[in-house]
Image (cartoon, rainbow, N blue to C red):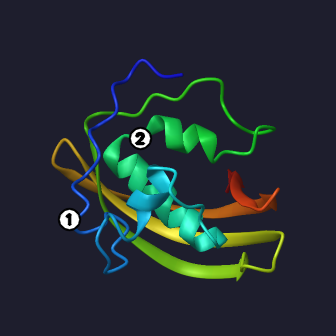
Amino acid sequence: MSSATPTPALPVSSRCPCLSGETYGECCGRFHAGRASAPTAEALMRSRYSAFATGNVPYLLATWHPDHRPADLELDPDLEWRRLDILATTGGGPLDSTGTVEFRAHYRQDGIRGTQQELSSFVREHGKWLYVDGR
């Protein structure tokens, strides 16, 4: 799927990259390992951010809606994701079928800080949340 080699998974006892306050193993690590599915659109957003931060391309592709998923995904190895801020959510709860999450992700590349802000759309199909697109 990608020619880039994924970064090894974080130790389960390390702080989760999504900054939930939980350990990686209690938070996004369990989704990345396939032990659980994200129960909300926000949880999926956080786990996708953590997948970007750890270079987990297979997880990113698996949680992308098939109608919108790219055929290939290469992550920039020089991009270091530093912080995730959830700005707003609409729907996306355990009983919803759609939802949006607005976020701001902070990164550093070549010593220069930057941000990416996006309003992401999610849909739940067959009991699992999937990323649709962002604007």
* Camera-nearest residue between 49 and 85: 49
Q: Residue at x 39, y 58 (%)?
A: 29
Q: Amino acid at mark 1?
A: Ser
Q: Residue at x 70, y 54 (%)?
A: 130
Q: Residue at x 31, y 63 (%)?
A: 17
- Quarter of the image with the N terminus is top right
* Camera-nearest residue between 71 and 25: 25
Name the mark on residue 14. Answer: 1
**Is 80 situated above or below 128?**
above
**Is 75 situated above or below 25?**
above
Q: Quadrant of residue 96?
A: bottom right
The residue positioned farthest toward the top in the image shown: 3
Q: Amino acid at mark 2?
A: Asn
* Residue density around tag 2, few if under 14, some if 14–19, many if 20 or more, within 10 Å: many
User: Percent from the top left, x then y, of residue 91?
Assistant: 76, 80
User: Percent from the top left, x then y, of residue 32?
Assistant: 46, 51
Q: Residue at x 59, y 65 (%)?
A: 38
Q: Earlier in the sequence, mark 1 or mark 2?
A: 1
Residue topped by disc 2? 56
